[in-house]
Image (spheres, rainbow, N blue to C red):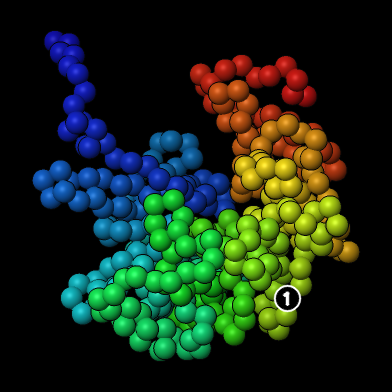
Amino acid sequence: MPVAKRSITIDDLWALKRLGTGSLSPDGAWTCATVTSHDMKKDEASTQLWLLSSNGKTQRQLTRGKRDSDPQWSPDGKWIAFVSKRGEGKDADEAGQLYVIPADGGEARRVCNVATGVSALRWFPDSKRVAFVSWVWPELKTPAEQEKRTKMEKDDKVRATVVEHNHYRYWDHWFARGRKPHIHIVDIGSGKFDNLFAGTALHLPPREPDASLFDISPDGNELAFTFDFNPDPREFSFTDIVGMDIKTRKTRTLTARSSTQTRFAFEGPRYSPDGQWIALLGTNFTERHNEQCRAWRVQRKGLKLQEWTGQWDHGVNGPLHWTATSEAVFFTAESGVAQPIWQLALPDGQPREVLRGPGEGERLPTCV
């Protein structure tokens, strides 16, 4: 007999599993993604990692934690790094920590214990190190000092803070008191981690800093990240892209501005696989504060900054993704009611639409 039809209920909605952001395996055969489920009786949610085959035939649960997030596949395909809060009692993680698990399954292992927590993971090309972001007190020099201050903040009954700049809140949450988002490096074998920005005024923009704000060169020797050099905390953020030599910690500005670009903001650097270019997003706030992003590029030899889609009348959504041959980047951009995927080749400045989802309108005839 045919199944009787009925209206969808709130219980049906909460019974659905929510698929989150995924990371593609180096061979393209699998995606590791977060899957969130809700327990109505316990009034709680849990998130685990699942492996999804690219052909759509296989789905397999990889982890069984309650708060697993941000899966990142290692370049050699052997490991999946992720952020989680695990353990019970005195062994429980106070903040999200970096874990790794074999891509073919097994037990997850905590790599290190960072008192200020871990987020925004990015593997080094050697698959032996991971870069991550942690909100730290920049005046404190050692992990022990950070841990002590973290406990003091947790036990402090006073939650008020005094701010003298416009970066004190982002949408629905306040910024951490006195803390800045710094990029760290950890060796996944030894668990030893290091703050790359320690002892400097460097930090990522505080508005939800994620891995889109920095990148690692193909040879693993340089870090490119987004930073605001403006010392006046009352001013709007006109960010630049800064390059840091990982070994010497020496820095240089990669987005050398002209006199007409003083009110530009650059972010989202992405190295080309051959290491010759850095693709990035640039926004011109000269005339209005809500201008859309455009694609830019920097030729690493000579640091030549060039507009890539300056005359194209669409906003570009990051992050930008290079082709394996370093000949073009992919990104999404609005087109009518759709968000197609576009390809932008070197040296062209005219993007070409390559994929549009079903039911989202016909392709515009102007795209060539």
Answer with the quarter of the image where residue 261 lies: bottom right
The residue sitting at 74% across, 23% down in the picture is: 367
Screen quadrant of the N terminus = top left
Closer to the camera in the image, 108 or 363: 363
Closer to the camera in the image, 42 or 53: 42
Is 201 left or right of 190, judged from the image as shown? right
**Residue 89 horizontal/vertical position (percent):** 18, 76
**Residue 351 horizontal/vertical position (percent):** 75, 34
**Residue 340 horizontal/vertical position (percent):** 61, 30
Does 345 appear above or below 185?
above
Does 55 appear above or below 255?
above
Q: Is residue 345 visible?
A: no
Q: Residue furthest right?
A: 302
For label 1, the SS is strand
The residue sitting at 78% across, 24% down in the picture is: 368
Q: Is residue 195 visible?
A: yes
Q: Which residue is denoted by mark 1 in the rendering? A: 251
